[in-house]
Amino acid sequence: MTRIAVIGTGGWGKNHVRVLSEMGVLAAVCDADAARAKEFATKYRVKGYDSVDQMLKSEQLDGVNICTPASTHLAVASRTLQAGVNTLVEKPMTSTLKEGEELIGVAESSGKILTVGFIERFNPAITELKKITKEGSLGRPILFEYRRENRRGENVTDVGVVKDASVHDIDTARWLFGEEPKTVYARVGSVMGKNEDFATILLGFGGERTAFITTNWVTPMRIRELTAVFTGGVATVDFISQEMQIHEESGTMVPKHTVQEPLTLELREFVAAIREKRSALVTPNDGLSVIRIAEAALASSKSGSPIYLSP
């Protein structure tokens, strides 16, 4: 049986624990808060630890999900990979590009899977949009316009809105277009904290292809929307309801697909990659590219000029 542990049970980590338990592969939980580790261990009837090193020594694990603050990802993931354990790190992969490059080196030396929690890749509506984009049923994609907003999560303190939230849309834009952006222009700012809490990012891809990403932690509403403009029509996606509408000259169509929890699909894919001894859908280089683009967005806002990314 595949055995997976979760490191970090606060915030989003508690959902990893729940889903892995439902899948029947949860083997252990680890949290620096010993009381919290014990609480989740008791609830899900697994071993609980407050030390990563102790857990790695005591458990025979096939994989770990790291859901700790971004500033700890390099240190924690390096330890799990060096211990020979396949590793999923929640986004962002690391808090800086330099750390990301270092972590990829560790992963390559270990020969184990390193993947990143870009959950929107597994949203059924985005999967359908990827199919439409690839097949060309609406023509060529021209513009992806994203809107992602709600209040900042209490557990996010070490990175701003760009590296915590905008990264989702940066990744799906790369994935849907099937290429890396060539230029990045952004304006970011802060009205409620030390890190930026609103951002507008423009990504220029090849030809006319563009992604326009707006993100904020200011508004009380929870919105996750994408408008995809093609040469032959427009597709709109609600990430939350997973509803898609396709608008063409002939009218509007609402494709039917099964609503599924993206986190479940993401973790199923991670477990399948472990069992099949293959790379995961989201690669370490995906994680690194997203960090590079996020840092370019922050640099662009600081300088007031576009950033041109090398191929």
Image: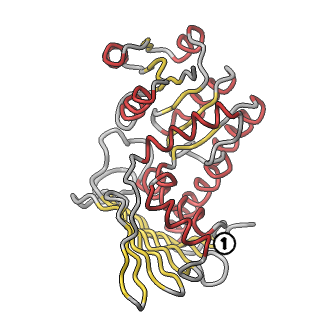
What residue appears at the point 36 percent right and 72 percent down from the top-left corner?
Answer: 254
Q: Quadrant of residue 47?
A: top left
Furthest residue in direction left, as rendered: 220
Q: Which residue is mark 1?
A: 182
- Furthest toward the top, the residue is 58
Q: Nearer the viewer, residue 298 or 33?
A: 33
Q: Measuring 67% from the left and 20% from the top, which residue is drawn there?
A: 83
Q: Residues within 10 Å of mark 1 (few under 14, many from 20)?
A: some
Q: Is residue 127 above or below residue 214?
A: above
- Rendered location of residue 255, percent (x, y): 40, 69
Q: Position of residue 168 (x, y in %)?
A: 48, 56
Task: Say which element carries label 1.
Answer: loop
Name above or below for residue 234 compared with residue 40. below
- Where, quadrant-wise, is the C terminus in this rendering? bottom right
Question: Which of the two residues, 270 or 179, is positioned nearer the viewer here?
Answer: 270
At 43% from the left edge and 76% from the top edge, which residue is drawn? 235
| Image position of 149 (left or right of 131) | left
Above or below, 35 against 296 in this view is above
